[in-house]
Image (cartoon, rainbow, N blue to C red):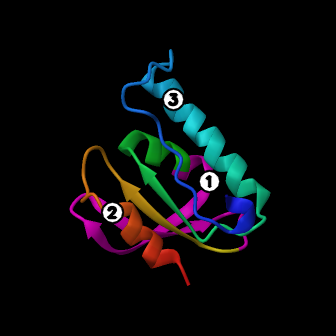
């Protein structure tokens, strides 16, 4: 897990009924990401976010002052550098809308952020 420096993928199950609206699920995702990033041990090398509305909400919650576009990972999937108003270091971020991206997208993102 993250405490041992192992990459983690958190996701919703497609056929699960979470008894929450899509907006409420997005808010829970924001809470999870901000909690993980606030711990700071170990430092997070990168963050991939799937879902347009969720991506926007998480970027807002992270208090970013700007994003620098680096390149497209796939059509509709951008690799960016998030510049925070509050974090000491910039964060490599993959922002992905809806049902876009090839099946190996998250593995390619991991290769981008792994030193």
Q: Main secondary structure of the magenta part?
A: strand
Q: Is residue 70 left or right of residue 62?
A: left
**Residue picked out by circle 1:** 62
Q: Is residue 54 left or right of residue 83?
A: left
- Taking the spot 50% from the left edge, 15% from the top edge, the residue there is 19
Residue that badge 2 annotates? 105
Quarter-of-image position of residue 75: bottom left
- In this picture, is 19 found above or below 79? above
Q: SS for tag 2? A: helix
* Magenta span contains residue 19: no
Q: Which residues are magenta?
A: 59-88
What residue does disc 3 label? 25
Task: Give the percent coordinates (x, y) of residue 93.
Answer: 48, 65
Mark 1 vs mark 2: give the one in front. Answer: 2
Q: Nearer the viewer, mark 3 or mark 2?
A: 2
Rendered residue at 37%/71% (across/down) = 108
* 1 or 2: tag closer to the N-terminus: 1
Residue 77 placement (x, y as % from top left):
30, 60
Badges 3 and 2: C-beta atoms under 8 Å apart? no
Q: Secondary structure at mark 1?
A: loop
Q: Residues within 10 Å of mark 1 (few under 14, many from 20)?
A: many
């Amino acid at each position: 897990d993250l405490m041992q420096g192992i990459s983690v993928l958190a996701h919703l199950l497609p056929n699960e009924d979470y008894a929450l609206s899509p907006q409420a699920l997005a808010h829970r995702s924001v809470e999870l990401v901000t909690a993980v990033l606030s711990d700071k041990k170990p430092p997070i090398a990168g963050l991939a976010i799937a879902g347009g509305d969720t991506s926007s909400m998480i970027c807002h919650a992270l208090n970013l002052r700007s994003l620098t576009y680096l390149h497209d990972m796939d059509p509709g999937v951008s690799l960016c550098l998030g510049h925070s108003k509050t974090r000491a270091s910039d964060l490599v971020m993959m922002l992905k809308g809806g049902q876009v991206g090839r099946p190996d997208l998250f593995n390619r993102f991991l290769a981008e952020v792994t030193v």
